[in-house]
Image (cartoon, rainbow, N blue to C red):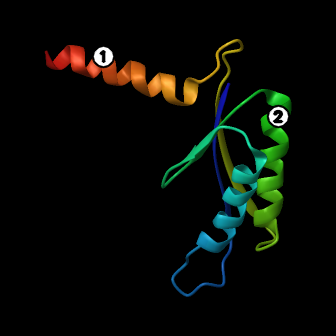
Amino acid sequence: MLFAFSVAPSTTDAEDGSVSGAVAEAIKVVRDSGLPHRTDSMFTTIEGEWDQVMPVIKAACDAVAQHSPRVSLVLKADLRPGYDGQLDAKVVRVDERIRELES
């Protein structure tokens, strides 16, 4: 199963509005979890079972809460039990379809 989430403080003291320090701490929690994951500019996606992933997301939220009394969490999940390696496999399938369209 894939869980894409974005977590950030709702407030910041940074003059430019940056929340990167808090977000970095959340991403470190994900990286330290040992679960397959990918981070891009908007979301972090983690692959695993409910019981593996949800404590990591909660810990990431807790890390951000150290910076702000209010935390925003956006969560999207692809719940497809029995499929592993989808973090990469889904992208490969789409790339293959694009190549088919181009030929």
> Element at badge 2?
helix
Q: In the displayed structure, would residue 45 be above or below residue 61?
A: above
Identify the residue under disc 2.
52
* Residue at screen point 62% across, 41% down: 37
Q: Tell whether label 2 touches label 1 (CB within 8 Å).
A: no
Q: Badge 2, how many Cα within 10 Å: few under 14, some, many 20+?
A: few
1 or 2: tag closer to the N-terminus: 2
Q: Residue furthest bottom?
A: 15
Q: Is residue 10 visible?
A: no
> Which of the image's four quarters has the N terminus?
top right
Horizontal arrangement in the rendering, residue 92 relative to residue 84 (left or right): left
Residue 63, position as x, y percentages in the image: 79, 63
Q: Residue tagged by mark 1?
A: 97
Q: Is residue 78 visible?
A: yes
Q: What is the three-letter code of the residue carrying label 1?
A: Arg
Q: Quadrant of residue 99?
A: top left
Outermost residue toward the left?
A: 103
Q: Amino acid at mark 2?
A: Gln
Q: Is residue 75 left or right of residue 50?
A: left
Return the mark for residue 68.
none
- Percent across and percent down for residue 38 are 56, 44
Number of numbered labels in the structure image: 2
x, y (%) of residue 4?
Answer: 62, 39
SS state under label 1? helix
Does 56 sit above or below residue 3? below
Q: Residue at x 55, y 87 (%)?
A: 15
Is residue 64 depicted above or below 33 in this figure? Answer: below
Q: 10 or 60: which is nearer to us?
A: 60
CA gap, disc 1 and disc 2: 32 Å
Q: Residue at x 57, y 24 (%)?
A: 86
User: In the displayed structure, does residue 101 sit left or right of residue 85?
Assistant: left
Q: Residue at x 81, y 39 (%)?
A: 54
